[in-house]
Amino acid sequence: MADLDKGMIPTAKSIQGYLTLKESQMFYIPSFQRAYSWGRLQCEKLLEDLLDYFENKREGNDAYFFGNVITVEEKNNNSLSNESSSTKIQLIDGQQRTTTFLLLLKALHFLLNDFKQIENDLNSSSVRKVDKWLEKILMILYKIDSNSITDYELKNFTRCFDADSELADKFLILKSESMNELDCATKDWNNILRCSKYNDFVPEEIPNKRKDNKYTGFYKNISFFYNSLKTEIKKSNRTSVEQIEFLSLFIQTLLEECKLIQIASVNINQAVAVFNSLNATGLPLSDADVICSLAYSHCDESSKNLFHDKWHELISNIEEGLNGYFSLNTVLQQFMYYQRFKKQGKTDITTPGLRYYYTNDNKTCIENPIEFCANLNVIANMWQELIGNYPLIRLALKINNNSHLFLATFFYHIIINRVSNDSNGLVDFDYASIIKPISELFLRLFTLLELVDFSYSSSEFKVFLYEMGDEFVKLDEQLSFDEIEKKFNANIFSIIQKSIKNLKSKLYEYRGDKLIYLNEYLYCEEYGKDFYFDIDPNRINIEHILPQSMHNILEPMRNLSEEEYDDYIEKLGNKILLERNINNNVSDDNFKVKKASSINSKPRGRRSKELGYKDSCYNIASDLCGYSRDVWVSEDIDRATKKSVERIYRFIVNPLDDSQKSLLVTE
């Protein structure tokens, strides 16, 4: 555990003691933190625990603890006078609970105000209780000193916010600058605090979301607290007086008898280290969250806003530009691989965890946070270009996703050594000349992985690729691409000789799916057609030309046993790529229907949906519409399998030199 003795002050505090701030103080959620993400499940558990403790507590019982929060105090001195200084209490751990406690208090504020609307019907004792707890809650939520405000001003406090937004900002207890928080969520939070009655609040809507998903967590959670407590206090047909008594005792229990431990620090690095040691509650931070926080801690005051903007740009580039292919953690991993290849010479294949690498092995990466962020943006922009515009790259990632680490190293090295970078990432770079040669090297190697009996972790694959990573970072300086290609060819030849023996025989025996994707590409290359590969791999299906179901098969295939039939339908020649929607409509049809139907046609009868090979973007499927026969049986599958095997065999073997090819078994 991190050392708590040096400047760390753990203090047990009541919820009231923790949330009560001076006017010059404010809870502050730094830009590196995640958005508010507690949902109904967490709020239900919190309220259930509170009510259970409240209803079952006995005199002398221990206080109810809500765990630890870790804060860092950051003073902003506006002048030489201490009176004009402000203090940000940064929430390193406890952001979700602190925000939720404040929402719960605001819901209680709404409920108390409901009773204020009927105070003429209440006895004086009940009115005093409502006023007492209303004052306490307002003092917390708006940092009010009760000695400096009149009763009238206190009772009408929130009503003046709509007319004076600067006043509202002055009394704001919590501000989020999380780069992950939606603008509409921030507006909801501010508007909730400015309302005095629940029904006055009009929630924002999240763009492009429907039903309950269009509302922010702030609105959904305060609605849950308000409505749940409103129902709770009315149980057992309680009178208004009894409801107020119940509510008063509940508020007292929450504020005075529920506690947490606040670990306060003046050093953000120390606070993050303690958080990493203690984090056992709430929603855990990802590696990217922790790395971001550490990078942010190295920013000086002048660069914090720039880091905020660049990190937000990075997240947007990944979430909006990479179509689900990679996460921020993946980009961090790719940059780690590049750094290790660049610095170590011969890289150890034992890979450290991301958090350990950036906080121990290579701390210098994050000590220049703006440069660090810019480098990650180069990788994100690079993949946005590669994935968005080059189907061959998408194919390479589909055949084996391990290729992304080494492709990232290759392209990133080429880019940073051949083009200049501005503050936003990439200047125009011509990828086209290098996409095909490097992608085909990986495709050839990973095709063999589909045919051997050992895994990616073997020396022929993982160890070899680590060696190539070491070589990639020497390109243009000590090494040419021709030399890289020779090393790939030597390894491919070695795998065939030692582990496969007869490559053609292995291809005839192949019954998997990965090489179906490759076959589509090679078919397009063979016939000079544009290769299409959907940017969303989930929209690509493997279509069995002869259906997997035996219901509609023709006479020649009925003589096969079920086992023989199952083997035929999985051969290379019987499987092609097809759009998911077309495949879903025609998968069980016979070949004549499949090749005659059109996605644009709407034939009479039971089918009126999109169907058929004619308008498929995949060339083998669309070209089958011109096939000379209307049946597809074993001889057609054997013929197509032979062509596919020859096509893939040439792709793997042709780049080898003549001496290597002469030693291969071909029959």
Image (tube, rainbow, N blue to C red):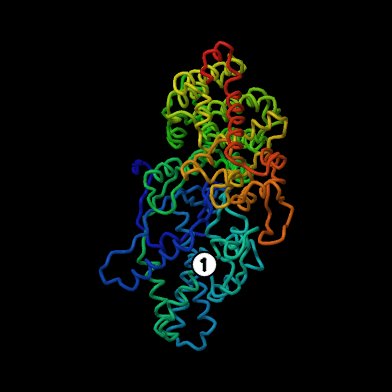
Q: Callout 1: helix, strand or loop? A: helix
The x and y percentages for residue 576 are: 61, 40
Q: The N terminus is located in which quarter?
A: top left
Q: Quadrant of residue 644?
A: top right
Above or below: residue 39 compared with residue 147: above
Looking at the image, which is closer to me, 116 or 579? Answer: 579
Q: How many marks?
A: 1
The x and y percentages for residue 324 are: 58, 44
The answer, for residue 369, to whether it is visible in the render is no
The answer, for residue 234, to whether it is visible in the render is yes
Above or below: residue 12 compared with residue 154: above
The x and y percentages for residue 205 are: 63, 62
Amino acid at dot 1: Ile
* Residue at the image position 53 percent from the left and 75 percent from the top: 151
Residue under numbered circle 1: 222
* Residue at the image position 64 percent from the left and 30 percent from the top: 522
Query: Which residue, as the protein is rendered here, is positioned at the far left?
Result: 60
Looking at the image, which is closer to me, 276 or 473? Answer: 473
Taking the image as shown, residue 646 lies to the left or right of residue 100, namely right
Q: Quadrant of residue 158?
A: bottom right
Looking at the image, which is closer to me, 664 or 137? Answer: 664
Above or below: residue 372 compared with residue 7: above
The x and y percentages for residue 379 are: 60, 34
* Residue at the image position 42 percent from the left and 54 percent from the top: 282
* Residue at the image position 42 percent from the left and 46 percent from the top: 265
> Crowdedness of circle 1 by 10 Å Cα count: few (<14), some, many (20+)?
many
